Image: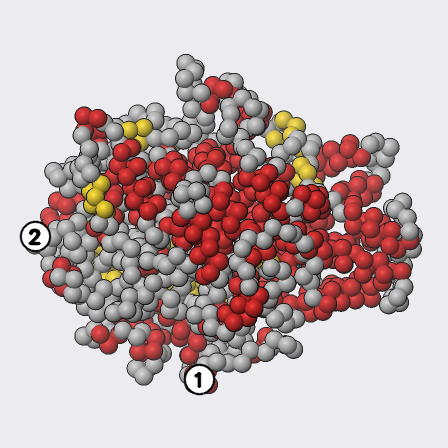
Amino acid sequence: MKKTSRREFLRLGRNAALSLTGMSLLPRSVFASSSPAFTDYKALVCVFLNGGCDSVNMVLPTAPSGGAGYDMYAGIRGLDNPDISLAVNNIDLSAGLRSTGNLLGAGWSNPYYKNATRTDAYLKGMYHIGGTKPFGIHGMMPELARLVQQQQAAVIANAGTLVRPVTRDGILNNAADLPSFLFSHNSQQTLTQTGEAKNTNAAGWAGRLFDNWQQVNNNHLLGMNIAYSRGRLPMGRETTPLRLSTGSPPAYKNLTGDKEQTLARRQLYLNMSDLSMQSPFKDLYNRMLLRSFQLTDVLAEAWESTASTFDGLTGSYGQPLFSVPEQIVLGIDDDISGDLIRQLEAVARMIAYSQSQTDIKRQIFFVQQGGYDTHGAQRFNHPLLLRELSLALWDFQQAMTFLSLNDHVATYNLSDFGRTVTNNSDGTGHAWGGHYLVTGGSVNGGKLYGDLPDLTLGGTHDHGRKGRLIPQIATDQIQATLARWFGVDDTLMPTIFPNIDNFSSRYLSFI
Amino acid sequence: MKGSIVPILALLLLNSDPITDISPPDTVHFLDQATFGATEQSAATLKNMGIEKWLDQQLNMGSAYDSDTDGWPTYLEETIRVAKIIWPADFPKEISVYLDPTNPDYTVFNQSKASREIRDVFLNVWFQNALHGEDQLRQRMAYALSQIIVVSTLDLLLQHRPEAIVSHQDLLAKHALGNYADLLKEVALSTTMGYYLTHHGNKKANPDTGTRPDENFAREIMQLFTIGLYELSLDGVTKIDSVTGKPIPTYDQTDIEELSRVFTGWDSRYNARYGSQRRTEGDLTRSMEFTAEHHDFGKKIVMGTTIPATDPANADGEADIDAVIIMLMNHPNTAPFVSKQLIQRLVTTNPNPAYVRRVAQVFLDNGIGIRGDLKAVARAILLDPEARTLGRTDNYAAKTKEPVLALTRFLRSFSVQPLNGWSKNGIVMSDFYRINKMTKNLGQEPLHAFSVFNFYSPDFIPSEASFMDNQLTAPEFEIQTDQLLIDYSNFIYTIGSQYEHNAIIQWYQEQLDHDQTVAEEEMLRIYAEEIIGDKGWKNTLMISFDQEMELLEQELEGDTNGDFSSLNRDDHAPDGSKAQAVQALVDHLDQKLTASTMTDAQKDLVINYLVNTFSVTESNRPKSARLMILEAIRVIITSSAYMVQH
């Protein structure tokens, strides 16, 4: 699998506002009437790293000794073999993070700067984070390091899809109850998002939540789940997310505006879409058309009313917030894509707009950054991806703080899986356990939850012999913890995460 | 699983033999499945020939790959030819020099330039073939295969060397009506695939450094190109383990690791260093070359099958690959896995398992003992009674048009041709199709999928009770976003209003400073020059509503002189001449565009709007007529009648 750039789909059949003649959709869920009535606003943002992020290089050991220590890591990753090395140097770059003015200096002043190339910058060093469980943040992620220092970000170590805890012995004896299709991209992407590690046909957990909370935003047209990229997470059995693209929303040409002819023409389209076709495919298409008309006005308003919301705010180099810094500023020899920055900008603007909508109390956003499947050319590609992830998370945090919503919005990332600790001389393969980030004002940040794993090949933490880490924490537990913060009570939790009671505790303490 | 539908189908399909008579409404339906979209001409031809002869002709037509000298260019030949016109300085040599490695002057096409714009040239060739090519079925099969054996110009390296996509397209088109085993072999050795799935430069395991071979291609050749993730019955239904109640995986991680050892030792030709990925190295127009030093010659065991060790002295890297392909072709999954997806791309995204079984059976054995015969498979797919039964509204027969096919159908229906007279690089261009920002406007572009998992998953089920309850797969819905529907509608409107023959002529006539006595061809050329010019962001095609203009006027006032003198604003009489003309127009469009599947309710809405609401501007009746036609076409093309074919 290679680099992706994703968007997409879905429509809603649920909203009472859509029930026009001939198209009434009766609620099928018994839970529809039991949506909680929140008085405060909260949002969750899931940043999915598509392809399987090599997070062993994103969150690094710093203490030298032991199976989980730096020396073990560096040995396996090939520190002594410059031709193939994927080992980040254990050099603390924290001095390059400024405490006044902009966080970073441009060009050669970047703390990770080396020879103006990203391959050299990739391995130059890291930012040391102290505490009882010290660790390092990859050198290409200075903003993330600062967020950790500010206790606005936390790391969850060695998490992955799990049905229940497993051991290496159990795996070797074929007695372990494993998630379906380990190491397969699409299956693992799906399972991290369904919250049901043996069921790739299940709805996404956020979709399942909205199925149960259909009135949570009082039938507002925007619903609860909004996706800027394609994924299972926000897809329910009865509800569907709004699927948007970044940038200004399109309007129907020649069908938008107040002129009599235009309105009459538009009515033709509405009438056409409102017909019952007695074919599920045609009916679905008609519903999608109908919804697209109803949404254009709301989306246009959301976009236009937030055009200047973040004016004057700046990012880590002093650049306008959410702008994409060029390679010369970043001090490397290639551009970052900008796609994730644009998606998080769109999320920030949608959150800003939603504050003007008194009905909207809960929102879950899904965005995605592609390209993490670094079987090859990891030194070329991974630095650009990590750089953009760090910039995007930082800019988003600044925006949330500006809106005084920092304590009300939590951002976290997921990925298909972590990657092999061993390398294939140019990159890494599909693996399992990885490290994940959570950011936001409510996060008990500045530290690592769980433990950095023992990297010994063929050791107790290895699925096999190639360094595929057996996760000690389930992605379900991470998301259940966030769901609880979001307002899901203990009674509902097993519906959302059916395997959650297979673990010694449902919740972690990072938020 | 599909419960109550089965008894109904049992009534409909008493006979499962291929159907070889074709009824007139079915001509359009058939052509929408077997070509890039029915046209009146192709429908008439099919009606005259009958389905068997039409199919025989298509299946036996031959291809650009039969001979190097027959004047039938491959995608690569044509791409180079056009590239030389646009960038003569960058591609100064004779075409043959870029194609013939035995030529002492052989130059790797696009290596030194690494131009991303070759992608535009490729798309032009792709559209020329799709819109006008004679070998429609071959090209349609190649397009279907391009969504199973995926390569994409979205790839970080390939975007700089888009000739890689050109070679991939040639590979698919060459084998589209050949044998699937040959296709797999060439894919395994393809440099393009070697880059896309990172097995070029793959090295056997090194015990000293601890590196192991890259597993990417080994995984995907199984998961995506042949057997999938779990065991299937011949009818494509997932088998369930009676003990666990879960699907049965086809392979495990060990199998992948073993298989990855096979795909070692292959790399692009003309790399300075084995496995190098520099933008201006390597040859993406030819297959990979073998370096024995990096190959693992040992014995491998994959899914219980032994691939025997070979003698390194023979330096034969293909023996392993051949053994793997035999293993995969013999795997019981391959026939249903591939057949079902081909059915999904051509006919229906939700095929009845019995249909899948019939086609998979042909994949297994074409009747004379050959496995993987794609010609036989294409025939079986298209002649099956499931494909040839009209007017069904049950769940099995539906296919939402994927955006690219919705576009080609639309363009073919309205006699599309290139618009000539615009400029690129200071060169006046003709005969070149450019479609602006396909992914943004349509959500899809040929060979530009988001990942090797294609634009959508073949198993996608929309989040809708009726779909989930009945497990109805509808992959094309996976890419339909709220915003995409708007973009698509706008795109159709743009083409219909700015790139249509009558619109262009009317535009010209309104430019009073233009010489009004010139020939029409000159008017079109001036439009291209002035409106498209050398701005790279426009479309370079022209459709025509001529037939509709004539039909409307003929019905309205009995002549076709183009003045539409009887088209009156206040003529709302339900039996008046305007109403009759509009009825005729809508009936015509219904037949032409939807194989007459619009419901009365849909037609009535359109007719009612055009007769009673659409405002005729009597000071410019010809323009009003054109706009009336455009309105009808836009609403139909964006409606479920057109977008969902049964």
Above or below, B301 against A228 in this view is above
On the image, numbered disc 1 is attached to which residue?
Answer: A30
Q: From the image, which quarter does the N terminus of chain B lie in? A: bottom left
Marks 1 and 2, the one that precedes in the sequence: 1
Q: Chain of mark 2?
A: A
| Amino acid type, mark 1 | Val
Q: Chain of mark 1?
A: A
Above or below, A422 against A358 in this view is above
Q: Is residue A119 found left or right of B183 in the rendered image?
A: left
For residue A65, the mark is 2
Place of residue B610 in the rendered image (x, y in percent of width and height, measured from the top left)? 79, 62
Q: Is residue B330 found left or right of A465 in the rendered image?
A: right
Residue in the foreground of this view, choosing between A323 and A199: A199
Instruction: Kindly identify the residue that appears in the image at 23 percent across and 52 percent down.
Output: B253
Q: In the picture, residue A348 is in which quadrant?
A: bottom left
Instruction: Kindly identify the residue that appears in the image at 33 percent across and 47 percent down.
Output: B330
Q: Is residue B431 found left or right of A365 in the rendered image?
A: right
Q: From the image, which quarter does the C terminus of chain B lie in? A: bottom right
Place of residue A510 in the rendered image (x, y in percent of width and height, measured from the top left)? 25, 69
| Amino acid type, mark 2 | Ser
- On the question of residue A196 being in view, the answer is yes
Of badges 1 and 2, the one in the foreground is: 1
Q: How many marks?
A: 2
Instruction: Kindly identify the residue that appears in the image at 30 percent across and 37 percent down.
Output: B322
